[in-house]
Image (cartoon, rainbow, N blue to C red):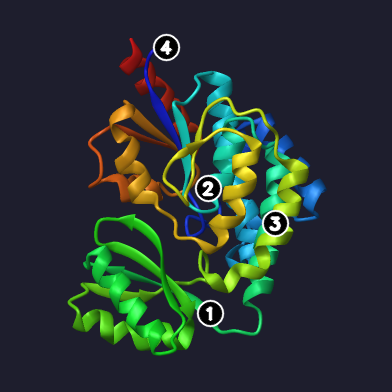
Amino acid sequence: MSIKCAFLFPGQGSQAMGMGEDFYNNSQLAKEMVADAGKRTGIDFEKLLFEENDDLEKTEFTQPAILLVSAIAHKLFENEMPIKPLYALGHSLGEFSALTAVGALDPIDAVELVNLRGKLMADACAGEDVGMMVSLGLEDGVVEEICEKQREAGMKVWPVNYNAEGQIVIAGVKPDLEKLEPILKEAKARRAMLLNMSVASHCPLLASATQPLAQKLEEVLRDEFTAPVISNVTAKGYETKAEALDLLPQQLVSPVRYKQSIAAHDDDVDCYVEFGHGGVLKGLNRRATKKPHFVVSDMESLATAIEEIKKMGA
């Protein structure tokens, strides 16, 4: 099939109770992947994903849960439609899901890896009241300048997720983020709101997590990329283990350049396929691209995506 697809994978914030349950109830492959992930990590994924609990919002559990559901969605799609993406792109945690889709990580190895990543991030933030805030309606440069001025005044705040035009997420110490809210609104932000996050991702507060993550990456990464992965750090593609070992530890302490990645590579593809719950990236892409965007989040959306992509390639 000549159609050029980009495979997309969501990150933290896309989680919800019940995600992946339709796959689990209707696919033996999904059941096996859930069981294998549980054996590897000791996490009861059936309880974590399908029953009311407090753990799903804790980063050490959120990350493997999201990756597992994304990996199941992709495997089911791949089994029905074995097309190679032009590239794979994930948002933050989603970059690790993207690596599974191109063969550079085994999915169960990846679940274990991001469980560790979540623990390392939580440990790095332990003892500090940290969080993240979304700013809506301001240009990048305005938010960057505000954060820089506040850091010069001793506050710990950094712009970290460039999600879409006028939407930036800021990470830092929660009391400083709270002080930042009226400053952003005075600058004419349409909204400045604290997010339900227990860590401060993609900023210098996570520096202590980079080396242990690099050590685990050395163990589990494979030099077997079937397509490039777009780096959150550079917004450029990479397709070797050596590049991944350099970029993925940096990703912990560097901004996620998601909107820059879409802008840089949108002309190269015919459509986007997002694997995982929620369609978060479809929402971010709405103003950034006119290309078709399919979300594979359950058996019905899986069938729809396959049918529509086949039509496009006919």
Q: What SS does tag 2 mark?
A: helix
Q: Looking at the image, do the residues carrying marks 4 and 2 touch, with CB atoms under 8 Å apart?
A: no
Residue hosting label 1: 130
Residue count near mark 1 (Cα–Cα under 10 Å), binned few <14, some 14–19, many ≥20: many
Question: Which residue is found at the position 56% from the left and 84% from the top?
Answer: 129
Residue hosting label 2: 94
Locate the C terminus and report the quarter of the image it occupies.
top left
Q: Name the amino acid, label 4.
A: Met
Please state the horizontal and vertical placement of residue 234, each as a whole percent of the image: 44, 48
Q: Earlier in the sequence, mark 1 or mark 2?
A: 2
Q: Name the amino acid, label 1.
A: Val
Question: Which residue is found at the position 24% from the left and 71% from the top?
Answer: 142
Disc 3 from disc 4: Cα separation: 38 Å
Residue 227 in the image: above or below residue 243: above
Q: Earlier in the sequence, mark 2 or mark 3?
A: 2
Q: Looking at the image, do the residues carrying marks 1 and 4 touch, with CB atoms under 8 Å apart?
A: no
The label on residue 1 is 4
Q: Classify residue 309 by image quadrant.
A: top left
Residue hosting label 3: 213
Please state the horizontal and vertical placement of residue 73, each as a whole percent of the image: 55, 36
Q: What SS does tag 1 mark?
A: strand
Q: Residue furthest left?
A: 188
